[in-house]
């Protein structure tokens, strides 16, 4: 485009811009918010009143009941307050943890977000060594849980091993049904096998009672797997390691301990069958 053409083209833009501005000015003032300032047609900046309005609207959205906030962002903001408060209440805690850990409890639980083991026990960081998975299933050949148990029992020398299930467990609900679940199917297989072995009992109960019973049976089955491990058997025999089965009620926050007492004859049989040197 030559200079003359460019001038004519620029004049066309200017005339149309003026026309648009006149049309905007002729609109009834009742259609415009009185709090919003007049902005240049080609301005790229946001009027101050609009920015203020957006911020206050966002604050109202965040504080409005029922509006879910970003918990990750909330957590990062609150972390410094938590760290400062914890350091103030327990001045030696973080310096001690920086030198190593000596937990007394190994916790084998479910990955469910409603089951925070350290919080529900009212304990502090460093008190509980943790392994969690879907439905707190203890696969005999699972390297992940096996490595955690071996390390906690042999090297950290924990005094207690806990297998904990919980009410309203999604994994238990899935195992109670027969829907195909893809990768979860092989994972839930031990739980379905527990269901199979106790099918008559479970079918004699109401759905809610059956689900709770399967939670308990799954904990007992997990304890059976844990106490077949040689490291656990050695620690039970040599230094009095204790194993526990718990069920956590997500509706009340209360833990319930299962009766898992084992006879001496049963323990001797287990030692004979599974202990290695």
Image: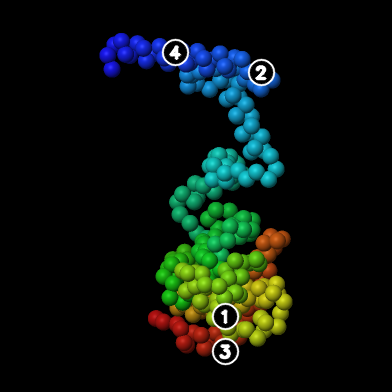
- Quadrant where the image shows the C terminus: bottom left
Q: Secondary structure at mark 4?
A: helix
* Mark sitting on residue 194: 1
Toward the left, the furthest residue is 2
User: Where is residue 102 drawn, in percent x and y?
Assistant: 50, 59
Question: In 3D space, how far apart are the residues under numbered discs 2 and 4 (Cα atoms)?
Answer: 24 Å
Report the residue marked by disc 4: 14
Can you see residue 1?
yes
**Depth order, front residue of 44/52:** 44
**Depth order, front residue of 268/273:** 273
Q: Nearer the viewer, mark 3 or mark 4?
A: 4
Q: In the displayed structure, would residue 237 be above or below residue 100? A: below
Q: Secondary structure at mark 1?
A: helix
Q: Nearer the viewer, mark 3 or mark 2?
A: 2
Q: Earlier in the sequence, mark 2 or mark 4?
A: 4
Q: Earlier in the sequence, mark 3 or mark 2?
A: 2
- Quadrant where the image shows the N terminus: top left
Q: Residue at x 70, y 83 (%)?
A: 204
Q: In the displayed structure, would residue 26 be above or below residue 90? A: above
Q: In the displayed structure, would residue 107 be above or below residue 195? A: above
Report the residue marked by disc 3: 265
Question: In 3D space, how far apart are the residues under numbered discs 3 and 4 (Cα atoms)?
Answer: 99 Å
User: Where is residue 200 drawn, in percent x and y?
Assistant: 65, 86
**Depth order, front residue of 234/44:** 44
Report the residue marked by disc 2: 28
Q: Earlier in the sequence, mark 3 or mark 4?
A: 4
Q: Nearer the viewer, mark 1 or mark 3?
A: 1
User: Where is residue 163 drawn, in percent x and y?
Assistant: 57, 70
């Amino acid at each position: 485009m030559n200079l003359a053409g460019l001038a004519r083209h620029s004049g066309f833009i200017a005339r149309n811009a003026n026309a648009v501005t006149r049309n905007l000015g002729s609109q009834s003032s009742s259609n415009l918010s009185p709090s919003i300032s007049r902005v240049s047609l080609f301005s790229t900046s946001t009027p101050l009143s609009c920015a203020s309005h957006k911020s206050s609207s966002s604050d109202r959205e965040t504080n409005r009941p029922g509006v879910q906030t970003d918990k990750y962002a909330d957590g990062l903001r609150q972390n410094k307050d938590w760290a400062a408060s914890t350091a103030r209440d327990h001045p030696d805690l973080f310096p001690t943890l920086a030198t190593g850990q000596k937990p007394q409890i190994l916790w084998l639980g479910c990955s469910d977000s409603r089951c925070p083991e350290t919080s529900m026990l009212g304990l502090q960081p460093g008190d509980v060594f943790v392994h969690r998975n879907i439905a707190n299933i203890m696969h005999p050949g699972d390297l992940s849980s096996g490595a955690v148990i071996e390390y906690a029992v042999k090297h950290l020398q924990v005094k207690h091993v806990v297998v904990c299930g919980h009410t309203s467990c999604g994994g238990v609900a899935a195992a109670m049904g027969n829907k195909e679940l893809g990768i979860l199917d092989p994972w839930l297989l031990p739980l379905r096998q527990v269901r199979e072995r106790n099918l008559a009992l479970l079918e004699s109960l109401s759905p809610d009672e059956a689900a709770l019973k399967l939670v308990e049976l799954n904990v007992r089955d997990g304890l059976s797997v844990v106490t077949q491990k040689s490291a656990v058997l050695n620690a039970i025999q040599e230094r009095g390691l204790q194993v526990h089965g718990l069920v956590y009620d997500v509706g009340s926050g209360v833990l319930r301990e299962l009766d898992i007492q084992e006879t001496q004859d049963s323990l001797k049989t287990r030692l004979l069958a599974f202990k290695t040197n």
